[in-house]
Image (cartoon, rainbow, N blue to C red):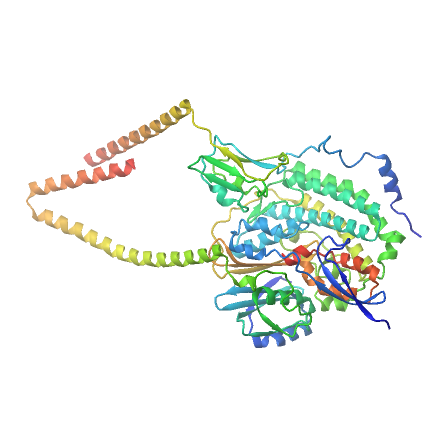
């Protein structure tokens, strides 16, 4: 005759620590790999729009003319497809959940305007590139000329 | 002989987590006939292949069912890989089997809890779900999601798991084994459980074959159609795989098959962790399925055999995607099991086929 | 034993006899589904025994065709036959469990035979693309011909130069070289 086979377990659970946490007061520690929400490093982002085309839920909106990147967190399914597709690796999956919102809608992020220094640095980089290309060409031409003179 | 009465059962019913409607024709307290009806949550997911490409569809595939989410994304990915002739790295295959078996453990623990709840054993229900929570924590640590994992891609896996995580997985399973043994004892030996389950809703082996039943529902009637036996993917490297069969065919046999399958799955996971090879876990898939190319695939889900079919049309979008979920073929068997049972046992029998109505309708 | 999956075509008239034969041989029914095509609906019946998954495809079923039900052989197929009737508008005759179009609660009749605007657009795009590709191939063939002609003209020029007096020929050659160099430079900058 078997009855109350769960006795040991039930009595044990009276004395053991509770399995649950008292939520708003305490919170469970999130593991590192948790898929919480998508974050974008707008400084690095080039607004190419690949993430927008990859998103299976259509939660992302990229507008190059207006310099913005927007995510509809209510549509996002946290699959992480955009973070894998991003050519600049500026999209990341952060291990924290978003706070509850009072209204639905998009979160809009703008790409910061470039400062004077950054622009100058970019120009310089561009100029250096052109210079290098020119030099390479000259060297090539010289080699060619030598060949023909031979 | 009393007059026949028709009692509508569901779609909203305390014991049913999902909308299933039954027309029960009863003679006093005995069910004479049961006619199932679904169709309350049809979402038309198969049609979404027209607007989502084959890489995006994997996230829709796993939303077919909340409990076998991983299995659906796995079955879909395997079908597309077969369609496009892609070879998946060995390590990814092993990781897929590990996660698939883990989701079987979580699904069966969920079912055992629901069954305990249905026959009124509240504390057993709580303990089942407490253990299931540990499995969900493992999912959270390995893939970042608790139920919808988004862990599979066409061509491999999203993340590799290093040895410390695999060790954590093994430790967790080792940790719940002891407590699970006590739960099993309660399930299989407690007289209050036996009183509700033994001899209820019996299905003979012939009927199980006739009605093409699948999964633990069929295995409880001694019909082996466990697709894992075919040894494909990571299952090919298992040293020994014997499906769990019962001869009883009643509710108790079904509960027993599921209870024992949890232990079997834990063994499979441990063996896979021991044998897992090194290497990459993802192979980039390029191009699109050829026009007119077709592939089909079967996979053993926690609820039974699942069938997938894909037809390409030369673009990134599939022409047709078909998923046949286990519950849809089990409905006929369920209607048979209900014939001749007591009205009070109807909820128990419906629950023991582990119905997943949202899966069935997609 | 090796696990095999087969696909084979089946005539609609042979459906019932095939189902009867498979039933006798102890196969189980896996499923039935439909695919919408240009010439009607393709129905695929799948049966399985221990090591085989056999797909029988009945091609081009139209709305006027009457498909016999195989529920008397395999009752498990009833959700799929009703689904085909509801979503694809297939007329299935002799169902044991017939929901008469009420199996799924749907707003539109035969929804799976209607293309979404996106799919339609894509199909048109594909057709256009195919047409463009064909046109391009034709053009390429022409261009190849043209290239031959170009080479010919260069050869002609050489012959002409040889016939000219040497001083004039040297001038023309230098001019041509300069032009080529300029072009190359332009290309490099771009």
Q: Quadrant of the N terminus of chain C?
A: bottom right
| Percent coordinates x, y for residue C77 in the rendering | 66, 67
Residue at the front extreme? A103
- In front here: B226 or B57? B57
Q: Is residue A41 visible?
A: yes
Figure quadrant of residue B194: bottom right
Nearer to the camera, A70 or B309: A70
Nearer-the-camera pick, A65 or B86: A65
Residue ranking furthest to the right:
A1
Q: Position of residue C150 (x, y in %)?
A: 20, 52
The tally of labels here is 0
Residue under the image location 66 percent in, 35 percent down: A31
At 68% from the left and 57% from the top, the residue drawn is B357
Q: Position of residue B245 (x, y in %)?
A: 77, 59
Q: Camera-side residue: B208 or C81?
A: C81
One can see residue B253 in this view: no
Name the residue located 39 percent from the left edge and 24 percent from the top edge: A121
Residue A59: name its quadrant: top right
């Amino acid at each position: 005759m078997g009855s109350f086979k769960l006795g040991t377990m039930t009595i044990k659970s009276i004395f053991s620590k509770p399995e649950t946490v008292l939520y708003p007061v305490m919170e469970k520690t999130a593991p590192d790999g948790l898929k919480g929400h998508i974050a974008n490093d707008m400084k690095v982002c080039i607004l190419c729009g690949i993430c927008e085309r990859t998103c299976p839920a259509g939660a992302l909106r990229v507008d190059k003319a207006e310099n913005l990147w927007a995510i509809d967190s209510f549509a996002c399914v946290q699959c992480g497809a955009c973070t894998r597709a991003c050519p600049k690796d500026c999209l990341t999956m952060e291990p924290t959940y978003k706070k509850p919102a009072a209204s639905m809608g998009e979160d809009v992020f703008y790409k910061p305007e470039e400062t004077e220094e950054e622009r100058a640095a970019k120009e310089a980089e561009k100029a250096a590139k052109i210079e290098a290309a020119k030099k390479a060409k000259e060297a090539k031409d010289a080699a060619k000329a030598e060949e023909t003179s031979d | 002989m009393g007059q026949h009465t028709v009692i509508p059962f569901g779609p909203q019913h305390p014991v049913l987590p999902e909308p299933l409607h039954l027309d029960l024709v009863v003679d006093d307290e005995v069910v004479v006939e049961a006619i199932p009806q679904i169709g309350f949550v049809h979402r038309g997911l198969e049609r979404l292949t027209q607007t989502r490409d084959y890489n995006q569809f994997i996230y829709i595939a796993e939303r077919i069912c909340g409990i076998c989410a991983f299995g659906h994304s796995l079955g879909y990915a395997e079908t597309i890989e077969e369609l496009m002739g892609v070879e998946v790295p060995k390590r990814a295959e092993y990781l897929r089997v590990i996660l698939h078996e883990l989701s079987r453990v979580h699904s069966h623990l969920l079912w055992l809890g629901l069954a305990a709840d249905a026959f009124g054993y509240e504390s057993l229900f709580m303990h089942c779900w407490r253990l299931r929570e540990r499995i969900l924590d493992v999912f959270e640590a390995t893939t970042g999601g608790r139920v919808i994992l988004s862990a599979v891609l066409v061509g491999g896996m999203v993340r590799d798991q290093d040895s410390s995580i695999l060790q954590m997985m093994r430790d967790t399973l080792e940790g719940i084994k002891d407590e699970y043994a006590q739960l099993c004892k309660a399930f299989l030996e407690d007289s209050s459980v036996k009183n509700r389950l033994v001899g209820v809703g019996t299905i003979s082996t012939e009927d199980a074959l006739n009605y093409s039943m699948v999964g633990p529902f069929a295995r409880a009637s001694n019909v082996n159609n466990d697709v894992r036996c075919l040894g494909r993917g990571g299952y090919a490297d298992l040293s020994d795989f014997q499906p769990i069969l019962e001869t009883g065919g009643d509710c108790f046999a079904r509960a027993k098959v599921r209870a024992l399958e949890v232990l079997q799955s834990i063994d499979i996971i441990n063996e896979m962790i021991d044998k897992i090879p090194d290497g990459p876990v993802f192979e980039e898939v390029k191009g699109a399925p050829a026009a007119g190319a077709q592939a089909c695939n079967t996979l053993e889900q926690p609820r039974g055999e699942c069938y997938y079919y894909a037809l390409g049309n030369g673009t990134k979008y599939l022409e047709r995607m078909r998923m046949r979920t286990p519950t849809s073929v089990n409905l006929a068997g369920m209607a048979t099991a209900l014939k001749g049972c007591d009205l009070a046992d109807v909820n128990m029998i419906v629950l023991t086929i582990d119905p997943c109505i949202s899966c069935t309708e997609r | 034993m090796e696990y095999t999956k087969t696909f084979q075509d089946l005539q609609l008239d042979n459906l019932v006899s095939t189902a009867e034969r498979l039933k006798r041989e102890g196969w189980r029914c896996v499923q039935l589904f439909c695919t919408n095509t240009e010439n009607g609906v393709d129905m695929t019946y799948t049966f399985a025994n221990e090591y085989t998954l056999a797909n029988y495809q009945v091609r081009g079923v139209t709305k006027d065709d009457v498909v016999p039900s195989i529920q008397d052989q395999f009752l498990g197929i009833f959700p799929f036959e009703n689904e085909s009737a509801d979503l694809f508008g297939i007329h299935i005759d002799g169902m044991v469990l017939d929901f008469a179009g009420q199996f799924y609660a749907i707003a539109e009749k035969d929804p799976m035979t209607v293309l979404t605007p996106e799919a339609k657009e894509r199909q048109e795009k594909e057709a256009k693309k195919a047409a463009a590709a064909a046109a391009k191939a034709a053009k390429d063939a022409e261009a190849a011909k043209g290239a031959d002609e170009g080479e010919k003209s260069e050869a002609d020029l050489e012959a002409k130069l040889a016939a000219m007096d040497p001083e004039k020929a040297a001038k023309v050659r230098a001019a041509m070289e300069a032009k080529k160099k300029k072009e190359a430079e332009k290309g490099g900058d771009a």
